[in-house]
Image (spheres, rainbow, N blue to C red):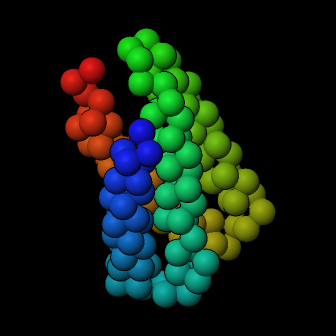
Amino acid sequence: MQNNFIQYLKYATIVMLLAMALVWIVTRFVMHQPQWFQGFWGIPVFYFLLYAGFHYGALLNTEGKAFVRYYMVASFLKLLLLVAIIVGYALFNKENARGFAINFLLSYFVFMAFEVYYLRKHFGSR
């Protein structure tokens, strides 16, 4: 289990760096708002920590129905948390809400695609 988690962390670090690059490219060149990147680099770091924690929990629940149950509950709780963060940020920081939401969702899709790929590759045959 420990080797699998360390391997996951290595891949997730690469994905985090790719998400950071994507956030920077979008804010700098697509939206022409380089000031939005200040602090937004932390979004991929947040996702890295969140997904690493949930992946560790998945490794503890690898037996059939326990894994499915854990994954469904964890996905639901992740989604609730992420929606609450976007809504909370939009309510308290309206001037940067658009940039935050766009970068937050970009990072979400990058990490979600990675999670689906990684879990199917390592747990799909069970």
Q: Residue at x 55, y 80 (%)?
A: 36
Image location of residue 5, percent across then percent down: 42, 47
Residue 79 against residue 105 in the figure, above or below: above
Quadrant assignment, res 126: top left
Q: Nearer the viewer, residue 18 or 37?
A: 18
Q: Residue at x 23, y 37 (%)?
A: 121
Q: Residue at x 41, y 17 (%)?
A: 63
Image location of residue 62, percent across then percent down: 42, 24
Image quadrant for the N terminus? Answer: top left
Q: Nearer the viewer, residue 113 or 5?
A: 5
Q: Please identify the residue farthest to the top as the structure is shown.
A: 65
Residue 80 against residue 7 in the figure, above or below: above
Quadrant assignment, res 39: bottom right
Query: Is residue 4 visible in this depiction of the protein?
Result: yes
In the image, 64: left or right of 37? left
Q: Residue at x 75, y 57 (%)?
A: 91
Q: Please identify the residue farthest to the front as the structure is shown.
A: 2
In the image, 70: left or right of 13? right
In the image, 125: left or right of 61? left
Residue 57 against residue 32 in the figure, above or below: above
Query: Is residue 8 visible in this depiction of the protein?
Result: no
Image location of residue 123, percent across then percent down: 30, 30
